[in-house]
């Protein structure tokens, strides 16, 4: 997922630079471990799970 996040940030900088956690994710690269991410925050966890679910659906549909 790190690769996908890095690609999305590059593809959509106007979205990546807005939002509550923009400062946390601003320097996120696909090689970053994510140790600094706010993974104890329930909202962040739920969004991550949602993105993962969408990705899995697309893979099943062959998109």
Image: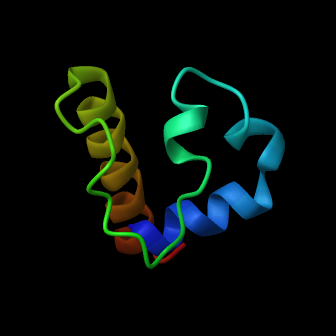
Residue 10 pos. (x, y %): 74, 62
Q: Residue at x 29, y 35 (%)?
A: 38
Q: Which residue is at the front of the view, 16 or 35?
A: 35
Q: Which residue is at the front of the view, 11 or 31?
A: 31
Residue 17 pos. (x, y %): 73, 37
Q: Residue at x 83, y 39 (%)?
A: 14
- Residue that protrudes farthest toward the right in the picture: 14
Q: Is residue 44 left or right of residue 40?
A: right
Model colouring = rainbow
Q: Is residue 22 left or right of residue 61?
A: right
The N terminus sits in image quarter: bottom left
Q: Residue at x 22, y 39 (%)?
A: 39
Relative height, residue 26 to residue 55 (above, below): above
The quadrant where residue 56 appears: bottom left
Q: Residue at x 58, y 66 (%)?
A: 6
Q: Is residue 34 left or right of residue 61?
A: left
Q: Which residue is at the front of the view, 60 or 12?
A: 12
């Amino acid at each position: 997922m790190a690769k996908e996040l890095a690609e999305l940030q590059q593809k959509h900088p106007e979205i990546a630079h807005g939002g509550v956690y923009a400062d946390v994710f601003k320097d996120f690269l696909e090689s970053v471990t994510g140790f600094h991410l706010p993974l104890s925050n329930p909202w962040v966890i739920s969004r991550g799970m949602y993105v993962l679910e969408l990705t899995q659906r697309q893979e099943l549909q062959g998109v």
